[in-house]
Image (tube, rainbow, N blue to C red):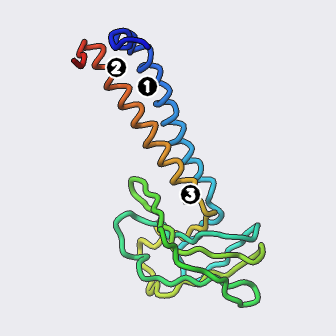
Amino acid sequence: MPSFSFVYQNLLWITVPAFCIALLLLVRCILGVVRLIRRSIIARVPLVEEHVVSFSEAGKVVLCNEGPRISLRAGGLRYRLMDEDGTEVPSRLRLFRAVTSGVSKARMELRTLRLPRPGRYVLHVEGLGEAQPRDRDYWIVFTKPHLLKTIGYVVAMVLTGGTAIVSLVFSLLRIFGIAPE
């Protein structure tokens, strides 16, 4: 078994590559989650009382609202999606509402819908009231479900970020000659 002094003398051979690898994996995870969120968008329509939306495939979709970060305009709205026959598409509230935010806008998951078939649907938004000047900044976004993959990326970011920090700390300890006694 190698002695502590041998490990300490060769610490940089371990920590510097570990730091570089962790940093590369962290960047890859960040780019992966950004790509995942962008690719998950199925449709994006303006916030109006009624809008026709086309879906190319059946299955689960998530209804989100998107708008300025600090705003109450989209709060308290009710959404109904109707197929061409006038039948309402079953939906349920999202138990864990993921929020994706940037500098100026945010997107919040609201409902999960199960589309019975591909095709055209009519989205009804109730409680919108009169049009306001900043309504052009608000959108309704339909996405593929991606919460579990996003959580996986976040866990990976935490682990790789922690590895990078620990490697950096041990590298600096070795560079400055600080050795535990």
State the SS at label 3: helix
Under mark 3, the amino acid is Leu
Sooner in the amino-acid sequence: mark 3 or mark 2: 3
Residue 43 vertical position relative to residue 7 in the rendered view, above or below: below
**Mark 2 and 1 residues: CB-CB less than 8 Å, in contact?**
yes
**Mark 3 and 1 residues: CB-CB less than 8 Å, in contact?**
no
Give the percent coordinates (x, y) of residue 123. 62, 81
Badge 2: how crowded within 10 Å, few (<14), some, or many (20+)?
Answer: some
Number of labelled discs? 3
Give the left or right position of residue 51, taking residue 23 as reference.
right
The answer to which of 5 and 106 lies nearer the viewer is 5
The answer for how far apart the CA atoms under marks 3 and 1 are is 27 Å
The answer for how far apart the CA atoms under marks 2 and 1 are is 9 Å
Give the left or right position of residue 165, taking residue 30 as reference.
left
- Residue wearing tag 1: 19
The answer to which of 66 and 14 lies nearer the viewer is 14
- Residue wearing tag 3: 148
Residue 42 vertical position relative to residue 94 in the rendered view, above or below: above
Instruction: Name the image quarter holding residue 88.
Output: bottom right
Sooner in the amino-acid sequence: mark 3 or mark 1: 1
Residue depicted at 76% across the width and 67% down the height: 56
Residue 12 vertical position relative to residue 161 in the rendered view, above or below: above
State the SS at label 2: helix
Give the left or right position of residue 72, taking residue 125 as reference.
left
Question: Split into 4 quadrants, where in the image is the C terminus?
Answer: top left
Residue depicted at 46% across the width and 24% down the height: 18
Residue depicted at 43% across the width and 57% down the height: 101
